[in-house]
Image (cartoon, rainbow, N blue to C red):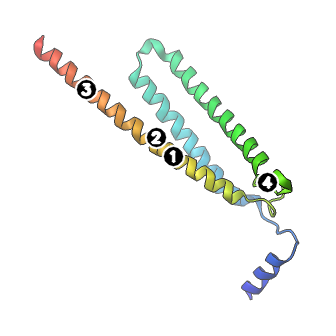
Amino acid sequence: MYNIIRRDLANSNTPVDISAMWLVPQFVLLGLTEAFNGIGQLEFYYSKLPNCRASLVMVMFTVSMAVASLVASILSNILNSITGQGGDVSWLSSDTNAGHVDYYYWLLSSLNFLNFLYYLICCRVHLSFSSSERRLSHAVDMEG
């Protein structure tokens, strides 16, 4: 019975009503990640920079959030114009039944995976620098 109704809805041109409540888990997760990202980023900056650079820490954090918002806006505008060429329906169409938001989320997932790989590279570089600094400070302590 369920498959018959689902098939009939898929074959018809009637819009399917989707509740906005489906977005609540995504926005809750997004809010949590933004909060933890902000806390972690500020703590990292405060631990690595001297106390006299506290204002620089806040500027770096604010600018990084602004750049991220700008990149997201540019990405969605470029994607909307590229996927809507030739009279095709854009991935980010206002008609959720015609658009392909799932493709957009797959693209964002791929970009996040690349960002994670970049993060791992940065961690490895940071660890190698911090271990060489520890060896250097240990050698200076041994001499002094």
| Mark 2, residue position | 118
Quadrant (top left/top right/bottom left/bottom right) for the C terminus: top left
Q: Earlier in the sequence, mark 3 or mark 4?
A: 4
Disc 1 marks which amino acid?
Leu
Q: Earlier in the sequence, mark 4 or mark 2?
A: 4
Q: Nearer the viewer, residue 20 or 87?
A: 87
Residue 74 against residue 6 in the figure, above or below: above
Please give the residue where the numbered disc 3 appears in the rendered image: 132
Which amino acid type is shown beneath numbered disc 4?
Answer: Ser
Q: Do callouts 1 and 2 mark residues in contact (Cβ within 8 Å)? A: yes
Residue located beneath label 4 in the image:
90
Q: Compared to 7, does 141 lie above or below?
A: above
Residue sitting at the far left: 143
- For the residues labelled 4 and 1, the Cα–Cα distance comes to 24 Å
- The three-letter amino acid code for the residue at tag 3 is Ser
Is 51 placed left or right of 139 in the picture? right
Measure how far apart labels 1 and 2 are at the Cα level.
Answer: 6 Å
- Single out the mark in the foreground, 3 or 4: 4
State the separation of the CA atoms marked 3 and 4.
51 Å
Q: In the image, 138: left or right of 10?
A: left
Q: CA distance from mark 4 to mark 2?
A: 30 Å
